Image (cartoon, grey):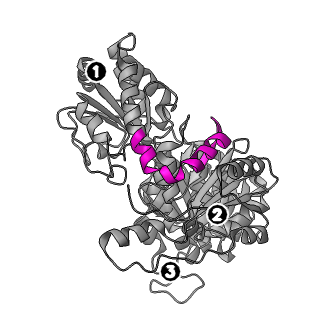
Amino acid sequence: MTELTGGEALVHALAWHGVDTVFGIPGTHNLEIYAHLAAVGIRHVSPRHEQGAGYAADGYARATGRVGVAVVTSGPATLNAATAIGQAYSDSVPVLLISPGMPLRHPGRGNGLLHETKDQRAAMDAIAAYSHRVTSVAEIPVAVAQAFATMTSGRPRPVHLELPLDVLAEADDVELVAPLPAPVPIPGAAELEVAAHRLRAAARPVVLAGGGARGAAGELRALAERLGAPVITTTNGKGTLPDDHPLALGAGVHLPSLRALVSDADAVLVVGSELAAADLWYGELPLAGKLVRVDIDPVQLVTNAVPDVALAGGAASALRGVLDRLGAGETPAGAVERAAHWRAVLRADARAEGAPYLWIVDALATALGRDGVLAADSAMVCYYGALANLPAYAPGSFLYPTGYGTLGYGLPAALGAKVGRPDTPVVALLGDGGIMFTLAELAAAAQLRLPLPVVVVDNGGYGEIRNEMGERGDPVHAVDLESPDFVALARALGCLAERADDPAALAGALARALAADRPTLLRVREPVRSGKP
């Protein structure tokens, strides 16, 4: 037992859980937290907006596999971060948002205290896995341990902790709480036997891997090879099976030919995927009578598609259980040829969809190599171009705001990824509309001296919405933006910058940017697309 203030108790609890970096902005109400960060060895990174802090924590978490932590002040700062927490919830990313709250004995109907919010906890509880308001200094280590247990067991979701102003400042005897064990559920033996039987009997199996399979890359590969099953991934599963593996079909569940692939299959193993409409652009898949589904979230097992065999448990433990029951064996004859056929079919879809952007994607692939990370925004160059055409070789190498579809994610997420993996090449890819949402984070990246290329593809506005208006026959308005001089703007914020409007220029600029002593904005001019593929 040690006497600590609430702020001290918080930072000690974070350090006990392995936190060495937080993203945030200091304010009047969170100074008691900031006063003690350095004493426990926690590095603070200062984005320029709380939404950027949340996205940076998200990018850090996706790239490192650790919990990302954001510390903001109360009221407007917390609500500024709310969109980032919504994105983390949508994509199952463990982000801990910490903010002060009104004092314990604050008048129930308010009295106009600075940053007063009607019910900050309730607002965040509607967005995160949960929002918890502590009521004593002694509770803080327990609340932190509970939050980490929630974020690191089962389906990862973001958590918000609210620390009342008076609790932060008070001192009391505190007992720190060690990280709680996070047991991974294992499917029942009977269900594993049935799943193994179904998959063993299949002549044309297919594996669909989502974000929930990222921690089971080795098991996924072994099972795919044992079954001879081609593997296609969602956006968040991209890279779980390296794209140069002979059974890899890449990230292509949004492509029109996926329906033909699934129709041809006699067994489909879905691992850690929502099968959500945000992934399946062309509608639900014909899975009846052939679906074996693995998910750590029992509720998700029957959401969007009811399986014939349901395996409730962690992806790695479930796939190991199936492998053990299949026993040793060689990859079935003809499996690689079958995968090559479907890879060609899906690749044709992907290249047709991303045709205007392939030269950009090819330059990015060369610059990133096998180990790089791309932080992508909700931009046409990303979801039409990079998603299915940029090769990925490891989980966590393609960061993208999938389900929520927020704009402005790419730049701060790249910042967070580069902070978490400083020796890894990281590139941000955004459109000219999206980067304006979080443009100020160029200044944050410049102050950190990050060698971060920021590629901005400029089509003069909100190109996707422009196209949708035209397809509907609506008046096309409110979507054409006068682009600023991005090169001059980036330089004013402390970055390098240049224009790169052809393949050779972009390739050279990316190489220089990755070797620079600060971020480099690369403005690429792209003609307006005529419509959806």
- Residue 99 quadrant: bottom right
The answer to the question of whether label 3 and label 1 lie on touching residues, with beta carbons closer than 8 A, is: no
Image point (79%, 56%), residue name: 518
Q: Horizontal and vertical percent for residue 285?
A: 25, 43
Q: Is residue 269 toward the left or the right of residue 245 in the image?
A: left
Say whether disc 3 or disc 1 marks the residue closer to the N-terminus.
Answer: 3
Query: Which residues fall within the magenta stretch?
Result: 348-374
Residue on which disc 1 sits:
196
Q: Quadrant of the C terminus?
A: bottom left
The relative height of residue 199 versus residue 80 in the rendered view (above or below) is above
Instruction: Provide residue 182's location: percent of width, then percent of height.
Output: 48, 38
- Given residues 234 and 346, the one toward you in this image is 346
Name the disc covering residue 301, or none. none
Q: CA distance from mark 3 to mark 2?
A: 21 Å
Counting other residues with Cα less than 10 Å from the Cα at mark 3, is it few (<14), some (14-19), or many (20 or more)?
A: some
The single residue placed furthest to the bottom in the displayed view is: 111
Q: Which mark is residue 117?
A: 3
Residue 429 image point, x, y percent: 59, 55
| One can see residue 138 in this view | no
